[in-house]
Image (cartoon, rainbow, N blue to C red):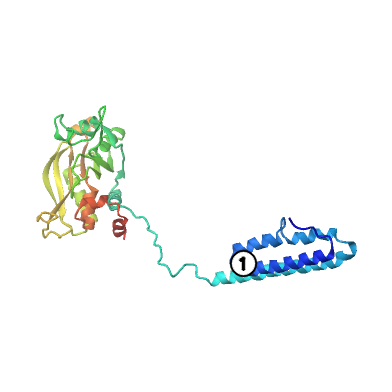
Amino acid sequence: MTPEITTPDQYESRADEIHRDGLEAFSGAADADELEQARIEYLGDKRGRILVLQKALGALPPEARREAGRRFNEVKSALVSAHSERQTALRSTAATRPALDLTMPARTQWAGGKHPVTLVIDEIVGIFRELGFTVALGPESESEWYNFGALNFPADHPAMDLHDTFYLGDGALLRTHTSPVQVRTLQRHAPPIRILAPGNVFRRDPFDASHAPAFAQLEGLAVDEGISFVDLKSTLTLFARRFFGATTRTRFRPSFFPFTEPSAEMDVECQLCKGGGCSACKGTGWMEIMGSGMVHPSVLEAAGIDSERYTGWAFGMGPGRIAMQRYGLPDIRLLYDSDVRFLSQVSE
């Protein structure tokens, strides 16, 4: 508890104490926080020690108040000046001090980048958008009818077996391709139709160097009057040359899919060996990138489209396989790696 000040001698003694301690506190402040604490303690408006002297003036004899007032102003002025000088000194020191601690190694901040498969999908969508195609999306959980029945799959097709498809129960399953999006689009919109259907699909495939149970797929569909296989070949050849390079060679091989007739596999010149033959292309110089064909009339009829009036073509590709060609990846499992250093390499 602070002793009461009632005499001039007590006042002078307390003034000397506050003056001495205050100057010491201000000069010894090591940083702005300590200086602020000292200011509050000695010059604060509510509990500052300088207030002790101010309030004690009224308790002194009238003849002593003039001298005590002079001493009060002297102490307060000295403390205010000491605070201001120390504040200026600290600011000057802070201005010359480096903003970073150059004695320690810098902490690099990783900047996120797009996944290689996303980069490939975006590029493909950009190419086809210039040809009048738009993007259509659909649910990943589908019914058997949209995934198989509407696409002309026979009831005993191997793809419908439990060892090939993830069934969810009550006739629901995880889609094995994005073709159901094509059917849903044909049901909702009248031709002409030109869409791309990117998305994730799911199959009971082993997780090895070239297969994964969950992967991205991108399909395309064009339906209109008078569309022929010539339109399919010219469009896909244009895409391959835009994506892989103007001199890239392409070829089409006969194939079979339930939902297209006729059907073809499309190959491009291997981008790793430039057609010379390597382990990635099994020495052939060619890499298969997609299946394609003319839309089967049964698929058009199932979606409510008059197959006598309209024809169409479709294709389906795995952007993961395309990314392997684009970035020279020997193993598809790299695309599922969580190591951000891999993404940094591709983004650069």
Give the residue number, with chain letter if any, for mark 1: 29
In the image, 231 versus 338, the foreground residue is: 338
Q: Quadrant of residue 151?
A: top left
Q: Is residue 75 something that shows in the picture?
A: yes
Provide residue 323's location: percent of width, then percent of height.
24, 53
For image coordinates 50% across by 70% down, the residue present is: 98
Provide residue 94's location: percent of width, then percent of height.
56, 69
- Name above or below for residue 179 compared with residue 33: above
Q: Which quadrant, please, contains the C terminus?
A: bottom left
Q: How many neighbours does mark 1 have within 10 angstroms: few (below 14), some (14-19), or many (20 or more)?
A: some
- Name above or below for residue 176 compared with residue 97: above
In the image, 51 versus 8, the foreground residue is: 8
Q: Which quadrant, please, contains the N terminus?
A: bottom right
- Name above or below for residue 154 compared with residue 271: above
Q: Residue furthest top?
A: 170
In the image, 276 versus 112, the foreground residue is: 112
- Identify the amino acid type marked 1: Ala
For image coordinates 61% across by 67% down, the residue present is: 29
Q: Quadrant of residue 91?
A: bottom right
Q: Is residue 241 something that shows in the picture?
A: no
